Image (spheres, grey):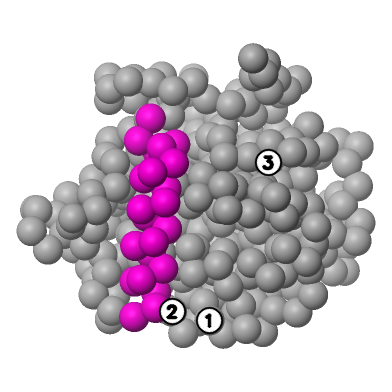
Amino acid sequence: MNQPLQTPYGFSSTTDDVIEGVSLTGRRAVVTGATSGLGVETARALAAAGAEVVLAARRPDAAADAAAEISRTTGNPHVTARSLDLADPRSVAAFTEAWTGPLHMLVNNAGIMALPELRRTPEGHELQFATNYLGHFALTLGLYPALAAAGDARIVSVSSLAHLMSPVIFDDLDYRFRPYDPWSAYAQSKTADILLAVGADRRWAREGIRANALNPGAIATNLQQHTGGLRTPEHLRKTVSQGAATSVLLAASPLLAGVGGQYFEDCAPSPVVEGSGALGSGGVAPYALDPENAERLWRTAAELIAG
């Protein structure tokens, strides 16, 4: 039996800890939602290790400012910004069609949380599912040739502890029949983010593309703009650098070479848990790692983005 992966890092580890001694010179990364919080810190850490980093964001001016600041503080001139609105299929298509050359690291970080009222995209999809998952699925699929060209690429899917609150409800993804609930909608999208990593890894591992998902932990960022701020007890909170550490570990650490299809938190693989009673202690729900769920969601998403 294979021994579970162990790393020397944990709850309090920072991005600088997990990237120490790692050279990413000559490697290229895309980080979505990189205008603040975890996205900016993830991009900064990758750039500090020498990577060429593209900050992909809905607000290109803010992303350009963030890219300039990262270049200034890291001394890495190869940090740029590109426009990407994950809720707009045309924006995602424009981004992927404009990409040239290999891509070594794709960090699907952007997200929205707990929108108080039901909102839909022009295509009719519930906005959290469309932004957090469906846009990232289309982005990942569109960048597949670039990931394959890299030879040893990694996909990082940022999920949440909240995935324990709901599986993907395949028969009503967009709340056409069930009453809308801000948290179940967010939870469904975060479960879908894990299944994206599981599905991508199953399909593409033999081509050198490995994918993992993660829970960054409780960090005060703009993500909580609709929830009245972070309510997690102080001793369970992380700084932005601690929260982004697991993303950076999965994207860049040699310790993760050849590892895929898993869910991490606190820089380590998470145990599978049964029941939502574990919500306060972490872990990953079995439905989020189920290969049949991953396959079904992949097929469903492919049909949705095809129109």
* Residue 32 visible (yes or no): yes
| Front position in the image: 113 or 198 | 198
The reply to whether discs 2 and 1 touch (Cβ–Cβ < 8 Å) is: yes
- The residue that appears at 27% across and 39% down in the rendered structure is 166
Point out the tag, 3 or 1, that comes first from the N-terminus.
1
- Residue 226 screen position, x and y as percent: 30, 53
* Residue 64 visible (yes or no): no
For the stretch drawn in magenta, the main secondary structure is helix
Q: Which residue is mark 1?
A: 93
Marks 3 and 1 sit apart, C-alpha to C-alpha, by 26 Å
- Residue 270 screen position, x and y as percent: 52, 25
Q: Which mark is residue 250?
A: 3
The reply to whether discs 2 and 3 touch (Cβ–Cβ < 8 Å) is: no
Q: Is residue 293 left or right of residue 152?
A: left
- Please tell me whether mark 2 sits on a helix, a strand or a loop: helix
- Amino acid type indicated by mark 2: Pro
Q: Is residue 303 left or right of residue 236?
A: left
Residue 164, picture quadrant: top left
The reply to whether discs 3 and 1 touch (Cβ–Cβ < 8 Å) is: no
Point out the tag, 2 or 3, that comes first from the N-terminus.
2
Q: Which residues are magenta?
A: 286-307
